Amino acid sequence: MATFADSAAKIAATPGESIVFADVERASSYRYGERAFLIQVVIDGLEPMLIDPEATGQDIGELSDALSARPMCLHACRADLPSLRALGVEPTRLHDTEIAAKVLSTTGFSLGWLVESYLGVHLAKEYSRADWSRRPLPAKWLEYALGDVLYMPELLAMLLEDTETVPIAIPDYYPRSLAHESRAEWYDSAMSQMEAWSPAPPTDEPWRKLSKLSSLRSPREYARARALWEAREEIAFRNDVSVHRIVRDRSIIQAARTDARSFDAFEKIDGFSGSDVDAVIPAFAAAVKEADAIPPKKLPSKRAARDDTPDRPSHRQWKVKAPGANALLSQAREQLAELSEIAQIEMQTLLPSAMLREWVWAEAGTNAPGRRGNDPVDVIETALADAGAAPCQIRLVTPALLAARDATA
Protein backbone atom coordinates (compact mmCIF):
# COMPACT_ATOMS: atom_id res chain seq x y z
CA MET A 1 0.00 0.00 0.00
CA ALA A 2 1.21 3.50 -0.85
CA THR A 3 2.16 5.97 1.87
CA PHE A 4 -0.33 8.63 2.90
CA ALA A 5 1.88 11.33 1.37
CA ASP A 6 2.15 9.55 -2.01
CA SER A 7 -1.61 8.90 -2.13
CA ALA A 8 -2.36 12.51 -1.19
CA ALA A 9 -0.06 13.83 -3.92
CA LYS A 10 -1.67 11.64 -6.58
CA ILE A 11 -5.20 12.65 -5.56
CA ALA A 12 -4.28 16.33 -5.36
CA ALA A 13 -2.99 16.17 -8.95
CA THR A 14 -6.41 15.14 -10.33
CA PRO A 15 -8.98 17.74 -11.42
CA GLY A 16 -10.95 19.21 -8.53
CA GLU A 17 -14.27 17.93 -9.92
CA SER A 18 -13.01 14.31 -10.10
CA ILE A 19 -15.28 12.04 -8.06
CA VAL A 20 -13.61 9.91 -5.39
CA PHE A 21 -15.34 6.51 -5.39
CA ALA A 22 -14.69 4.98 -1.99
CA ASP A 23 -15.61 2.16 0.33
CA VAL A 24 -14.68 1.47 3.95
CA GLU A 25 -13.96 -1.82 5.68
CA ARG A 26 -14.46 -1.91 9.44
CA ALA A 27 -13.94 -4.63 12.05
CA SER A 28 -16.72 -3.89 14.55
CA SER A 29 -17.27 -7.60 15.20
CA TYR A 30 -13.67 -7.82 16.39
CA ARG A 31 -12.59 -4.34 17.55
CA TYR A 32 -14.16 -1.66 19.72
CA GLY A 33 -16.09 1.00 17.81
CA GLU A 34 -16.64 1.64 14.11
CA ARG A 35 -13.30 2.96 12.91
CA ALA A 36 -12.03 2.30 9.39
CA PHE A 37 -9.33 -0.34 8.88
CA LEU A 38 -9.18 -0.11 5.08
CA ILE A 39 -10.30 2.52 2.59
CA GLN A 40 -10.61 1.58 -1.07
CA VAL A 41 -10.45 4.47 -3.56
CA VAL A 42 -11.02 4.71 -7.31
CA ILE A 43 -10.52 8.01 -9.18
CA ASP A 44 -10.57 8.47 -12.94
CA GLY A 45 -7.01 8.57 -14.28
CA LEU A 46 -5.41 6.85 -11.27
CA GLU A 47 -4.72 3.25 -10.38
CA PRO A 48 -7.07 1.96 -7.66
CA MET A 49 -5.76 2.71 -4.17
CA LEU A 50 -5.87 0.77 -0.92
CA ILE A 51 -5.34 2.97 2.14
CA ASP A 52 -4.54 1.61 5.59
CA PRO A 53 -5.75 4.25 8.11
CA GLU A 54 -4.02 2.32 10.91
CA ALA A 55 -0.55 2.64 9.35
CA THR A 56 1.87 3.85 12.01
CA GLY A 57 4.37 6.66 11.77
CA GLN A 58 2.35 8.63 9.20
CA ASP A 59 0.19 11.75 9.38
CA ILE A 60 -3.14 11.18 7.64
CA GLY A 61 -4.02 14.89 7.66
CA GLU A 62 -2.71 15.66 4.16
CA LEU A 63 -4.49 12.65 2.70
CA SER A 64 -7.74 13.56 4.47
CA ASP A 65 -7.49 17.07 3.02
CA ALA A 66 -7.00 15.70 -0.50
CA LEU A 67 -10.03 13.40 -0.16
CA SER A 68 -12.11 16.22 1.32
CA ALA A 69 -11.34 18.57 -1.59
CA ARG A 70 -13.32 16.48 -4.07
CA PRO A 71 -16.81 15.04 -4.47
CA MET A 72 -17.09 11.52 -3.05
CA CYS A 73 -19.36 8.62 -3.98
CA LEU A 74 -20.16 5.96 -1.39
CA HIS A 75 -22.71 3.19 -1.22
CA ALA A 76 -24.83 3.78 1.91
CA CYS A 77 -23.30 7.02 3.18
CA ARG A 78 -24.80 6.61 6.64
CA ALA A 79 -22.64 3.52 7.17
CA ASP A 80 -19.29 4.90 5.95
CA LEU A 81 -19.42 8.65 6.61
CA PRO A 82 -18.93 8.48 10.41
CA SER A 83 -15.75 6.40 9.96
CA LEU A 84 -14.41 8.80 7.32
CA ARG A 85 -15.31 11.91 9.31
CA ALA A 86 -13.43 10.46 12.28
CA LEU A 87 -10.33 10.62 10.03
CA GLY A 88 -11.02 14.22 9.07
CA VAL A 89 -12.54 13.45 5.66
CA GLU A 90 -15.34 15.90 4.78
CA PRO A 91 -16.11 15.70 1.03
CA THR A 92 -17.19 18.86 -0.82
CA ARG A 93 -20.16 16.99 -2.26
CA LEU A 94 -21.61 13.52 -1.86
CA HIS A 95 -23.00 10.91 -4.20
CA ASP A 96 -24.63 7.70 -2.98
CA THR A 97 -25.51 4.77 -5.24
CA GLU A 98 -27.92 3.42 -2.61
CA ILE A 99 -29.84 6.70 -2.44
CA ALA A 100 -29.98 6.87 -6.25
CA ALA A 101 -31.44 3.36 -6.24
CA LYS A 102 -34.07 4.38 -3.66
CA VAL A 103 -35.06 7.41 -5.75
CA LEU A 104 -35.63 4.89 -8.57
CA SER A 105 -37.18 2.33 -6.19
CA THR A 106 -35.20 -0.53 -7.69
CA THR A 107 -36.07 -4.04 -6.56
CA GLY A 108 -32.92 -4.21 -4.43
CA PHE A 109 -30.67 -1.57 -2.90
CA SER A 110 -27.50 -3.48 -1.98
CA LEU A 111 -24.34 -2.78 -3.96
CA GLY A 112 -24.11 -6.42 -5.01
CA TRP A 113 -27.68 -6.44 -6.33
CA LEU A 114 -27.20 -3.18 -8.23
CA VAL A 115 -23.88 -4.17 -9.81
CA GLU A 116 -25.32 -7.50 -10.92
CA SER A 117 -28.58 -5.97 -12.22
CA TYR A 118 -27.02 -3.02 -14.05
CA LEU A 119 -23.65 -4.43 -15.09
CA GLY A 120 -24.13 -8.19 -15.02
CA VAL A 121 -21.21 -8.65 -12.62
CA HIS A 122 -21.49 -10.81 -9.51
CA LEU A 123 -19.66 -9.38 -6.48
CA ALA A 124 -18.33 -11.95 -4.03
CA LYS A 125 -19.27 -11.23 -0.41
CA GLU A 126 -17.42 -14.01 1.44
CA TYR A 127 -15.11 -11.58 3.27
CA SER A 128 -17.68 -8.94 4.23
CA ARG A 129 -17.52 -10.00 7.90
CA ALA A 130 -13.80 -10.70 8.00
CA ASP A 131 -11.47 -9.25 10.61
CA TRP A 132 -10.20 -6.25 8.65
CA SER A 133 -7.98 -5.24 11.58
CA ARG A 134 -5.75 -8.22 10.77
CA ARG A 135 -2.26 -7.38 9.52
CA PRO A 136 -1.02 -8.19 7.01
CA LEU A 137 -4.27 -8.47 5.08
CA PRO A 138 -4.38 -11.52 2.78
CA ALA A 139 -4.13 -10.82 -0.97
CA LYS A 140 -7.56 -12.41 -1.56
CA TRP A 141 -9.15 -9.99 0.90
CA LEU A 142 -7.58 -7.00 -0.83
CA GLU A 143 -8.82 -8.25 -4.21
CA TYR A 144 -12.31 -8.63 -2.74
CA ALA A 145 -12.18 -5.13 -1.23
CA LEU A 146 -11.32 -3.52 -4.56
CA GLY A 147 -14.31 -5.21 -6.15
CA ASP A 148 -16.62 -3.01 -4.07
CA VAL A 149 -15.36 0.17 -5.77
CA LEU A 150 -14.15 -0.84 -9.24
CA TYR A 151 -17.68 -0.88 -10.67
CA MET A 152 -19.05 2.16 -8.84
CA PRO A 153 -18.13 4.79 -11.51
CA GLU A 154 -20.08 2.99 -14.23
CA LEU A 155 -22.93 2.13 -11.84
CA LEU A 156 -23.33 5.74 -10.67
CA ALA A 157 -23.40 7.00 -14.27
CA MET A 158 -26.17 4.54 -15.16
CA LEU A 159 -28.21 5.35 -12.06
CA LEU A 160 -27.94 9.11 -12.62
CA GLU A 161 -28.99 8.64 -16.24
CA ASP A 162 -32.09 6.80 -15.04
CA THR A 163 -32.94 9.64 -12.65
CA GLU A 164 -32.95 11.92 -15.70
CA THR A 165 -35.06 9.67 -17.92
CA VAL A 166 -37.39 7.51 -15.79
CA PRO A 167 -40.63 9.45 -15.20
CA ILE A 168 -42.46 9.64 -11.87
CA ALA A 169 -46.00 8.27 -12.10
CA ILE A 170 -48.71 9.87 -9.94
CA PRO A 171 -52.12 8.69 -8.64
CA ASP A 172 -55.21 9.52 -10.70
CA TYR A 173 -56.49 12.05 -8.16
CA TYR A 174 -53.28 14.09 -8.31
CA PRO A 175 -53.20 17.42 -10.18
CA ARG A 176 -51.69 17.04 -13.65
CA SER A 177 -49.15 19.74 -12.82
CA LEU A 178 -47.27 17.08 -10.85
CA ALA A 179 -47.02 14.73 -13.82
CA HIS A 180 -43.57 16.01 -14.80
CA GLU A 181 -41.67 15.76 -11.51
CA SER A 182 -37.95 15.10 -11.96
CA ARG A 183 -36.19 12.18 -10.25
CA ALA A 184 -32.91 14.07 -10.76
CA GLU A 185 -34.23 16.85 -8.52
CA TRP A 186 -35.22 14.22 -5.96
CA TYR A 187 -31.72 12.76 -6.02
CA ASP A 188 -30.06 16.17 -5.69
CA SER A 189 -32.33 17.06 -2.78
CA ALA A 190 -31.68 13.73 -1.05
CA MET A 191 -27.92 14.25 -1.38
CA SER A 192 -28.19 17.79 0.01
CA GLN A 193 -29.97 16.35 3.04
CA MET A 194 -27.28 13.68 3.37
CA GLU A 195 -24.50 16.27 3.26
CA ALA A 196 -26.12 17.97 6.27
CA TRP A 197 -26.73 14.67 8.09
CA SER A 198 -24.97 13.59 11.24
CA PRO A 199 -25.65 10.54 13.43
CA ALA A 200 -28.00 10.96 16.37
CA PRO A 201 -26.09 11.69 19.58
CA PRO A 202 -25.78 8.82 22.08
CA THR A 203 -28.71 8.40 24.43
CA ASP A 204 -28.38 9.26 28.11
CA GLU A 205 -28.89 5.59 28.98
CA PRO A 206 -27.24 3.50 26.24
CA TRP A 207 -27.27 0.42 28.48
CA ARG A 208 -31.02 0.19 27.92
CA LYS A 209 -30.28 -1.18 24.45
CA LEU A 210 -29.31 -4.51 26.02
CA SER A 211 -31.23 -7.35 24.38
CA LYS A 212 -33.99 -8.82 26.58
CA LEU A 213 -33.58 -6.07 29.17
CA SER A 214 -37.35 -5.97 29.65
CA SER A 215 -37.26 -9.57 30.91
CA LEU A 216 -35.73 -8.34 34.19
CA ARG A 217 -38.18 -7.99 37.03
CA SER A 218 -36.94 -5.41 39.50
CA PRO A 219 -35.11 -2.07 39.63
CA ARG A 220 -32.25 -3.86 41.43
CA GLU A 221 -31.81 -6.20 38.48
CA TYR A 222 -31.83 -3.19 36.17
CA ALA A 223 -29.07 -1.62 38.28
CA ARG A 224 -26.98 -4.78 37.95
CA ALA A 225 -27.54 -4.84 34.17
CA ARG A 226 -26.42 -1.22 33.94
CA ALA A 227 -23.30 -1.86 36.02
CA LEU A 228 -22.41 -4.99 34.03
CA TRP A 229 -22.91 -3.12 30.74
CA GLU A 230 -20.65 -0.30 31.92
CA ALA A 231 -17.98 -2.79 33.05
CA ARG A 232 -18.09 -4.53 29.68
CA GLU A 233 -17.76 -1.21 27.83
CA GLU A 234 -14.73 -0.22 29.90
CA ILE A 235 -13.03 -3.60 29.35
CA ALA A 236 -13.77 -3.57 25.62
CA PHE A 237 -12.50 -0.01 25.18
CA ARG A 238 -9.34 -0.65 27.17
CA ASN A 239 -8.52 -3.80 25.18
CA ASP A 240 -9.85 -2.57 21.80
CA VAL A 241 -12.13 -5.58 21.50
CA SER A 242 -15.75 -5.79 20.35
CA VAL A 243 -18.06 -5.78 23.37
CA HIS A 244 -19.68 -9.02 22.23
CA ARG A 245 -16.30 -10.75 22.32
CA ILE A 246 -16.18 -10.05 26.05
CA VAL A 247 -19.63 -11.41 26.94
CA ARG A 248 -22.94 -11.43 25.08
CA ASP A 249 -26.01 -9.46 26.13
CA ARG A 250 -27.80 -12.64 27.17
CA SER A 251 -25.03 -13.42 29.67
CA ILE A 252 -25.30 -9.94 31.20
CA ILE A 253 -29.07 -10.35 31.57
CA GLN A 254 -28.61 -13.76 33.17
CA ALA A 255 -26.01 -12.36 35.59
CA ALA A 256 -28.29 -9.44 36.48
CA ARG A 257 -30.95 -11.91 37.66
CA THR A 258 -28.57 -13.39 40.23
CA ASP A 259 -26.55 -11.90 43.05
CA ALA A 260 -23.31 -13.35 41.69
CA ARG A 261 -20.41 -11.63 43.42
CA SER A 262 -17.69 -14.26 43.27
CA PHE A 263 -15.56 -15.90 40.60
CA ASP A 264 -17.25 -19.27 41.16
CA ALA A 265 -20.74 -17.76 40.96
CA PHE A 266 -19.96 -16.09 37.63
CA GLU A 267 -18.41 -19.23 36.18
CA LYS A 268 -21.78 -20.96 36.61
CA ILE A 269 -23.43 -18.39 34.33
CA ASP A 270 -23.50 -19.23 30.63
CA GLY A 271 -20.96 -17.08 28.76
CA PHE A 272 -18.76 -16.26 31.75
CA SER A 273 -16.82 -19.53 31.85
CA GLY A 274 -13.60 -20.14 29.94
CA SER A 275 -10.07 -18.80 29.85
CA ASP A 276 -10.98 -15.80 27.67
CA VAL A 277 -13.32 -14.41 30.34
CA ASP A 278 -11.59 -15.52 33.54
CA ALA A 279 -9.34 -12.45 33.69
CA VAL A 280 -12.25 -9.99 33.63
CA ILE A 281 -14.68 -11.77 35.97
CA PRO A 282 -13.41 -9.78 38.98
CA ALA A 283 -14.44 -6.55 37.23
CA PHE A 284 -17.94 -7.93 36.65
CA ALA A 285 -18.21 -9.18 40.23
CA ALA A 286 -17.22 -5.74 41.51
CA ALA A 287 -19.87 -4.18 39.24
CA VAL A 288 -22.60 -6.36 40.76
CA LYS A 289 -21.47 -5.49 44.30
CA GLU A 290 -21.57 -1.80 43.40
CA ALA A 291 -25.08 -2.12 41.97
CA ASP A 292 -26.32 -4.00 45.02
CA ALA A 293 -25.06 -1.19 47.26
CA ILE A 294 -27.21 1.47 45.57
CA PRO A 295 -29.97 2.77 47.90
CA PRO A 296 -33.48 1.76 46.78
CA LYS A 297 -34.51 5.35 46.02
CA LYS A 298 -31.61 5.76 43.57
CA LEU A 299 -32.18 2.60 41.57
CA PRO A 300 -32.95 3.04 37.84
CA SER A 301 -36.56 2.77 36.79
CA LYS A 302 -37.71 -0.16 34.70
CA ARG A 303 -38.86 2.26 32.02
CA ALA A 304 -36.58 4.61 30.12
CA ALA A 305 -37.25 8.31 30.32
CA ARG A 306 -39.56 9.15 27.45
CA ASP A 307 -39.20 11.99 25.01
CA ASP A 308 -42.61 13.29 26.07
CA THR A 309 -43.22 16.94 26.85
CA PRO A 310 -46.27 18.38 28.60
CA ASP A 311 -47.53 19.56 25.20
CA ARG A 312 -46.48 16.62 23.05
CA PRO A 313 -46.29 12.95 24.06
CA SER A 314 -43.92 10.55 22.31
CA HIS A 315 -45.46 9.21 19.11
CA ARG A 316 -45.24 5.76 20.71
CA GLN A 317 -47.90 6.99 23.17
CA TRP A 318 -50.23 8.61 20.63
CA LYS A 319 -52.61 5.66 20.56
CA VAL A 320 -53.48 6.36 24.20
CA LYS A 321 -52.63 10.03 24.69
CA ALA A 322 -53.42 11.48 21.25
CA PRO A 323 -55.80 9.13 19.39
CA GLY A 324 -56.61 11.73 16.72
CA ALA A 325 -52.95 12.12 15.80
CA ASN A 326 -52.50 8.35 15.86
CA ALA A 327 -55.42 7.82 13.47
CA LEU A 328 -54.09 10.48 11.09
CA LEU A 329 -50.60 8.95 11.22
CA SER A 330 -51.95 5.52 10.30
CA GLN A 331 -54.02 6.93 7.42
CA ALA A 332 -51.10 9.03 6.16
CA ARG A 333 -48.83 5.98 6.12
CA GLU A 334 -51.38 4.13 4.00
CA GLN A 335 -51.62 7.01 1.53
CA LEU A 336 -47.83 7.36 1.30
CA ALA A 337 -47.38 3.61 0.83
CA GLU A 338 -49.76 3.77 -2.15
CA LEU A 339 -47.97 6.83 -3.53
CA SER A 340 -44.58 5.14 -3.07
CA GLU A 341 -45.72 2.14 -5.10
CA ILE A 342 -47.20 4.26 -7.88
CA ALA A 343 -44.42 6.83 -8.07
CA GLN A 344 -41.72 4.17 -7.62
CA ILE A 345 -39.83 6.08 -4.93
CA GLU A 346 -38.82 4.20 -1.77
CA MET A 347 -41.12 5.24 1.07
CA GLN A 348 -38.55 6.69 3.48
CA THR A 349 -37.03 8.61 0.56
CA LEU A 350 -40.48 9.87 -0.32
CA LEU A 351 -40.94 11.23 3.21
CA PRO A 352 -38.97 10.11 6.29
CA SER A 353 -41.09 9.05 9.26
CA ALA A 354 -39.82 11.87 11.46
CA MET A 355 -40.95 14.50 8.93
CA LEU A 356 -44.34 12.83 8.59
CA ARG A 357 -44.85 12.92 12.35
CA GLU A 358 -44.08 16.65 12.43
CA TRP A 359 -46.95 17.32 10.03
CA VAL A 360 -49.30 14.92 11.85
CA TRP A 361 -48.74 16.72 15.13
CA ALA A 362 -49.10 20.14 13.49
CA GLU A 363 -52.41 19.00 11.99
CA ALA A 364 -53.95 16.87 14.73
CA GLY A 365 -51.95 17.33 17.93
CA THR A 366 -53.07 19.22 21.02
CA ASN A 367 -53.56 22.93 20.19
CA ALA A 368 -52.20 22.23 16.67
CA PRO A 369 -52.48 24.88 13.91
CA GLY A 370 -54.71 22.50 11.95
CA ARG A 371 -57.19 22.48 14.80
CA ARG A 372 -57.30 26.26 14.84
CA GLY A 373 -58.66 26.39 11.31
CA ASN A 374 -55.41 27.18 9.47
CA ASP A 375 -55.26 26.40 5.77
CA PRO A 376 -54.35 22.66 5.55
CA VAL A 377 -51.90 23.18 2.68
CA ASP A 378 -50.12 25.89 4.67
CA VAL A 379 -49.93 23.54 7.66
CA ILE A 380 -48.34 20.82 5.49
CA GLU A 381 -45.87 23.15 3.80
CA THR A 382 -44.81 24.85 7.04
CA ALA A 383 -44.47 21.66 9.10
CA LEU A 384 -42.51 19.77 6.43
CA ALA A 385 -40.27 22.71 5.52
CA ASP A 386 -39.46 23.26 9.20
CA ALA A 387 -38.58 19.55 9.46
CA GLY A 388 -36.12 19.85 6.57
CA ALA A 389 -38.17 18.44 3.69
CA ALA A 390 -37.15 19.47 0.18
CA PRO A 391 -39.56 21.37 -2.11
CA CYS A 392 -39.94 18.32 -4.38
CA GLN A 393 -40.94 16.19 -1.38
CA ILE A 394 -43.49 18.74 -0.21
CA ARG A 395 -45.02 19.08 -3.69
CA LEU A 396 -45.41 15.35 -4.24
CA VAL A 397 -46.73 14.29 -0.83
CA THR A 398 -49.12 17.18 -0.20
CA PRO A 399 -52.13 15.67 -2.10
CA ALA A 400 -51.60 12.33 -0.32
CA LEU A 401 -51.52 14.01 3.09
CA LEU A 402 -54.62 16.04 2.26
CA ALA A 403 -56.38 12.78 1.33
CA ALA A 404 -55.33 11.29 4.69
CA ARG A 405 -56.67 14.39 6.45
CA ASP A 406 -60.00 14.17 4.66
CA ALA A 407 -60.29 10.44 5.46
CA THR A 408 -59.95 11.09 9.19
CA ALA A 409 -61.99 14.30 9.38
Image (cartoon, helix red, strand yellow):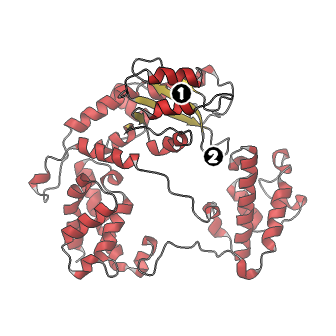
The answer to whether 148 appears left or right of 184 in the picture is right
Q: How many marks?
A: 2
Kindly check if marks 2 and 1 are in contact, taking CB atoms under 8 A apart as contact: no
State the image coordinates of residue 217 (x, y, percent, origin top left).
Answer: 68, 74
Answer few, some or many: residues within 10 Å of disc 2's Cα (few below 14, many 20 plus, some between 14 and 19): some
Q: Nearer the viewer, residue 177 or 56?
A: 56
Q: Is residue 228 above or below residue 184?
A: below
Which residue: 21% across, 62% down?
Answer: 398
Identify which amino acid the numbered label 2 is placed on: Gly
Q: Nearer the viewer, residue 397 or 13?
A: 13
Which residue: 86% across, 49% down?
Answer: 279
Which residue: 89% across, 62% down?
Answer: 262
Q: Is residue 323 above or below residue 109?
A: below
State the image coordinates of residue 224 (x, y, percent, origin top left).
Answer: 75, 68
> Which mark sits nearer the N-terminus, 2 or 1?
2
Q: Nearer the viewer, residue 343 or 85?
A: 85
Q: Quadrant of residue 172?
A: bottom left
Q: Is residue 6 above or below residue 331?
A: above
Kindly tell me whether residue 24 is visible in this rendering.
yes
| SS class, disc 1 | helix
Which residue in the structure is indicated by mark 2? 33
Kindly tell me whether residue 124 is visible in this rendering.
no
**Marker disc for residue 145:** 1
The answer to whether 131 appears left or right of 16 in the picture is right
Q: Quadrant of residue 281?
A: bottom right
Q: Quadrant of residue 115?
A: top left
State the image coordinates of residue 31 (x, y, percent, origin top left).
Answer: 67, 42
Identify which amino acid the numbered label 1 is placed on: Ala
Which residue: 60% across, 65% down?
Answer: 204
